[in-house]
Image (spheres, grey):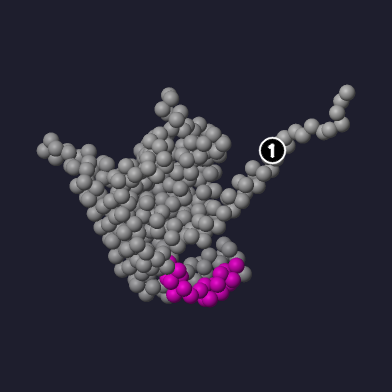
């Protein structure tokens, strides 16, 4: 005889609960990185300066002088000095150019109005008049102030970033010894260190290649601008160097801004066309030939995901986020590849869909 009692069965897991937890976690993460930007941005910049110092130091360590290689501690000091002197030099160059740009702003505003008048036959009288009215309402002082804001932030946060970097260098050796006690086992520590080395190696490669190619682009841009007598050659070369780290936008900036300055200075004449053609050809060669040749397979990143990362981190952290978007995406992809549940997201970030964890590499 069958009992009328109902047999209790365990209720199946509700898939929506997992999605809900994921959405809540993402929301908390977004609030954290946005609201904590004043703390996180200097730490992130210090981390990538540290990685750049390590990248330069590892290559300096390979240099042989009289049959003897440069000691690791000396290579690290030399690489740190190179980065520090470079940053100070860039700040001094930009500071010296800001006053010159501010003094020249009214003259360039007048030149811009003249160029609009020259183009009135192409764009129409109505459009030319509206553009002229916009230029009349333009305040050069506000533009100079907005351009100097990142420089002022760098000056005020520079000491903090410097101390963070120094402490990271000092702590890097001891951290490996402390990690097993932090995570509770040697196996976990080994895996975390392997993931960290993979991420650091990928970022070092990215920063080393981009630093070198950005420097080449800046030098060639300066050569073209100086040869044609274009104003603000030093400042534009420095800006080209830094914006070259921003995907796609840096390339457009490196061509458009020098050409615009040359157009305002020379009009539709020979120097303008030399600057436009010279910067265009140079950036195409550097970005599409030299950089891929140096990078080989590169970082295996999807172009679309790179642009989405640029928009995401740029929206959260502004200009600093735009510069750090690719390294942050590299770290995210490598970390996601370590967890089976997150590996599809890592595959979506890659260019070919092939990602591997440290465990896969060990078992290969």
The quadrant the N terminus occupies is top right
Q: Judge from the rendering whether residue 281 lies leftward or rightward of residue 90; answer left or right.
A: right
- Magenta: predominant secondary structure element? helix
Residue 84 occupies quadrant = bottom left
| Mark 1, secondary structure of its residue | loop
Residue sitting at 59 percent across and 71 percent down? Answer: 130
Residue 177 occupies quadrant = top left
Q: Is residue 270 visible?
A: no
Q: Residue furthest left?
A: 66
What span is colored magenta in the figure?
127-147
Q: Is residue 292 above or below residue 119?
A: above
Residue 57 lies, in percent from the top left, at 26, 45
Disc 1: CA contacts within 10 A as few (<14), some (14-19) or many (>=20): few
Residue sitting at 29 percent across and 55 percent down? Answer: 166
Residue 120 lies, in percent from the top left, at 56, 67
The front one of 106 and 81 is 81
Q: Is residue 167 visible?
A: yes
Residue 248 lies, in percent from the top left, at 47, 49
The quadrant the C terminus occupies is top left
Q: Judge from the rendering whether residue 76 lies leftward or rightward of residue 262; answer left or right.
A: left
């Amino acid at each position: 005889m069958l009992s009328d009692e109902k047999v209790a069965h365990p209720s199946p897991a509700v898939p929506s609960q997992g999605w809900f937890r994921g959405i809540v976690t993402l929301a908390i993460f977004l609030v954290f990185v946005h609201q904590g930007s004043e703390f996180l941005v200097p730490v992130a910049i210090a981390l990538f300066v540290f990685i750049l110092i390590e990248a330069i130091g590892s290559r300096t360590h390979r240099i042989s002088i009289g049959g003897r290689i440069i000691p690791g501690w000396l290579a690290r000091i030399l690489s740190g000095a190179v980065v520090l002197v470079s940053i100070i030099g860039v700040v001094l160059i930009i500071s010296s150019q800001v006053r010159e740009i501010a003094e020249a702003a009214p003259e360039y505003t007048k030149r811009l109005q003249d160029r609009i008048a020259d183009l009135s036959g192409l764009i129409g009288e109505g459009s030319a008049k509206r553009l002229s009215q916009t230029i009349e309402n333009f305040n050069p002082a506000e533009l100079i102030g907005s351009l100097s804001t990142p420089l002022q932030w760098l000056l005020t946060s520079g000491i903090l970033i410097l101390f963070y970097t120094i402490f990271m260098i000092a702590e890097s050796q001891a951290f490996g010894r402390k990690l097993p006690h932090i995570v509770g086992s040697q196996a976990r520590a080994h895996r975390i260190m392997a993931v960290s080395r993979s991420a650091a190696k990928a970022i070092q490669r990215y920063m080393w290649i981009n630093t070198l190619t950005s420097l080449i682009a800046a030098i060639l841009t300066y050569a073209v601008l100086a040869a044609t007598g274009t104003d603000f050659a030093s400042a534009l070369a420095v800006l080209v160097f830094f914006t070259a780290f921003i995907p796609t936008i840096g390339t457009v900036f490196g061509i458009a801004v020098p050409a615009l300055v040359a157009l305002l200075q020379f009009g539709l004449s020979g120097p303008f066309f030399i600057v436009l053609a010279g910067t265009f050809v140079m950036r195409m060669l550097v970005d599409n030939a030299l950089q891929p040749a140096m990078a080989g397979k590169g970082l295996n990143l999807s172009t679309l995901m790179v642009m989405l990362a640029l928009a995401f981190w740029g929206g959260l952290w502004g200009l600093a986020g735009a510069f750090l978007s690719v390294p942050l995406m590299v770290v995210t992809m490598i970390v996601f590849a370590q967890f089976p549940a997150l590996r599809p997201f890592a595959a979506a970030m890659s260019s070919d869909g092939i990602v591997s964890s440290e465990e896969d590499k060990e078992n290969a």
